[in-house]
């Protein structure tokens, strides 16, 4: 029966290495499919990180402008928080 088996399958080290390779590629918790999914997720998270860093820099820039420019601060307060002077009346017009 052992005469019909090719010499490749008789080598213990090659068979052990082959079994290890199959185990690592398909059966392990860190198999190839999981690695590709994790790599794609890391890539998408890095893109999100870049997006949010850009947004943070925009907000910091706007904040700096608001802290230095009183007219812009007043405009911002009037538009966002509906603040007014005591002698003024505010009319809010909403489009349907």
Image (spheres, helix red, strand yellow):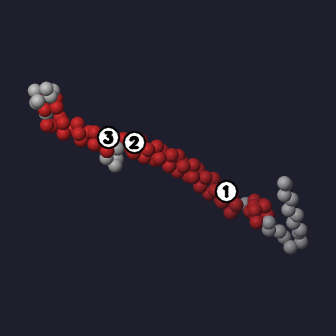
Query: Nearer the N terminus, badge 1 or badge 2?
Result: 2
Please name the residue shown 68% across and 63% down the image.
67
Q: Where is residue 39 drawn, in percent x and y?
A: 43, 44
Q: Circle 3 sits on which residue?
A: 25
Please name the residue shown 89% across and 68% down the image.
89
Please name the residue shown 14% across and 37% down the image.
12
Q: Where is residue 58 drawn, in percent x and y?
A: 63, 53
Query: Which mark is drawn over residue 27?
Result: none
Q: Where is residue 83 drawn, in percent x and y?
A: 80, 68
Disc 2, SS? helix
- Using the rendered image of the protein, determine whether residue 56 is visible from the camera's viewpoint: yes
Disc 1, SS? helix
Considering every residue shown, the one lying at the far bottom of the view is 86
Q: Circle 2 sits on which residue?
A: 33
- Using the rendered image of the protein, determine whether residue 71 is visible from the camera's viewpoint: no
For the residue pair 48 and 54, the one nearer the viewer reads as 48
- Figure quadrant of residue 23: top left
Query: Nearer the N terminus, badge 2 or badge 3?
Result: 3
33 is higher (above) or lower (below) than 88:
above
């Amino acid at each position: 029966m052992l005469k019909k088996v090719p010499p490749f399958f008789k080598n213990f080290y090659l068979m052990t290495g082959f079994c290890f390779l199959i185990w690592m590629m398909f059966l392990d918790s860190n198999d190839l499919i999981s690695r590709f999914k994790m790599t794609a997720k890391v890539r998408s998270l890095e893109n999100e990180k870049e997006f949010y860093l850009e947004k943070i820099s925009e907000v910091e820039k706007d904040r700096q402008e608001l802290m230095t420019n009183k007219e812009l601060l007043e405009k911002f307060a009037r538009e966002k928080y509906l603040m007014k002077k005591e002698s003024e009346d505010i009319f809010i017009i909403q489009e349907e």
